[in-house]
Image (spheres, rainbow, N blue to C red):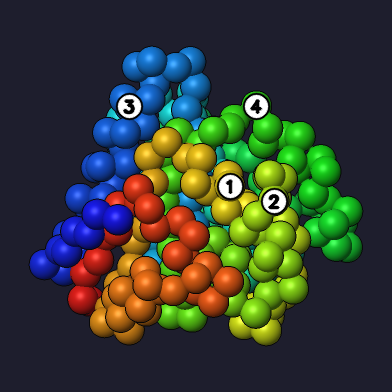
Amino acid sequence: MEFTEYPDAEMMMIDLANVLAGELKNALLTHDRASFAVPGGTTPGPIFDALCGVDLDWGRVSVLLTDERWVPETSDRSNTRLLRERLLIEKAAAAEYLPLYAPFETPEEGIPGLTDAIAPHLPISVMLLGMGADMHTASIFPGADKLNEALTTDATLVPMRAPGAPEPRVTLSASVLNGAIRRHIVIIGDEKRAALEKASGMMPEDAPVAAILQGTMVHWAKA
Ligand SMILES: O=C1O[C@H](COP(=O)(O)O)[C@@H](O)[C@H](O)[C@H]1O
């Protein structure tokens, strides 16, 4: 993995937004469309704030999440809600959105239709991941019921229930994450840096983020 340390989180968010925008523009030079996978959670909001106003051909970009909580968009827990409020606005409102949630009771019922919709957009052109201090990335959690499946399957999406996750999830599988052409992970703070460094010497079964570190650019700021 390639590690970049920034003077502060604000600078990191702006620089990273520029890097991602540049990679999307490059992808659109050689392809009709580009796909852009992004995390939810508490970290990426400021990156979205910077990206949504960037001048690029958003009408040719398909945006998807790396993972989603199985809740409707009206929930505060919805990663889609974050995207609708902070990324899919201004110039980026022209982007296509590929949801990882559908109004079924369980992820298992929704996954076949969601998978069909994502299939034409793989491999992902540009991907940004987050990571929890427990070393989960996307919704591939340590101790999750389908951890082994998420790490080994060729399927696109995996349903996930984990002790560290209050609701069922849907996650892109490790094979789809590793298939992304440009791969980045963004983390803030000493606790996550220590977790990431520890994970790099561990097995993905214990530290899921280890499954995607090879060839992934890590972006870190202390605060
Ligand atoms: O639950 C999730 O957690 C991770 C990390 O989130 P953060 O709040 O610690 O930044 C996130 O990357 C993932 O997309 C999200 O669903």
Whether label 4 touches label 2, CB < 8 Å: no
Please identify, in this view, whether the residue under mark 3 or under mark 4 is nearer the observer.
4
Distance between the Cα atoms at labels 3 and 4?
19 Å
Label 2 element class? loop
Label 3 element class? helix
> Residue 16: percent from the left, percent from the top?
26, 50
> Residue 19: percent from the left, percent from the top?
25, 42
Count of all numbered marks drawn on residues in the image? 4
Identify the amino acid type marked 3: Lys
Tell me if residue 90 can be seen.
no
Q: Is mark 3 within 8 Å of ligand 1?
A: no
- N-terminal of the pair, mark 3 or mark 4, is 3
The residue drawn where x is 31% and y is 25% is 26
- N-terminal of the pair, mark 4 or mark 2, is 4
The residue drawn where x is 37% and y is 69% is 200
The residue drawn where x is 44% and y is 74% is 202
205 up-or-down from 191: above or below: above
**Mark 2 = which residue?**
153
**Mark 4 = which residue?**
120
Distance between the Cα atoms at labels 1 and 3?
24 Å
Looking at this view, is 76 or 61 the one in front?
61
Quarter of the image where one finds residue 68: bottom right
Please identify, in this view, whether the residue under mark 1 or under mark 3 is nearer the observer.
1
Whether label 3 touches label 4, CB < 8 Å: no
Identify the amino acid type marked 4: Pro
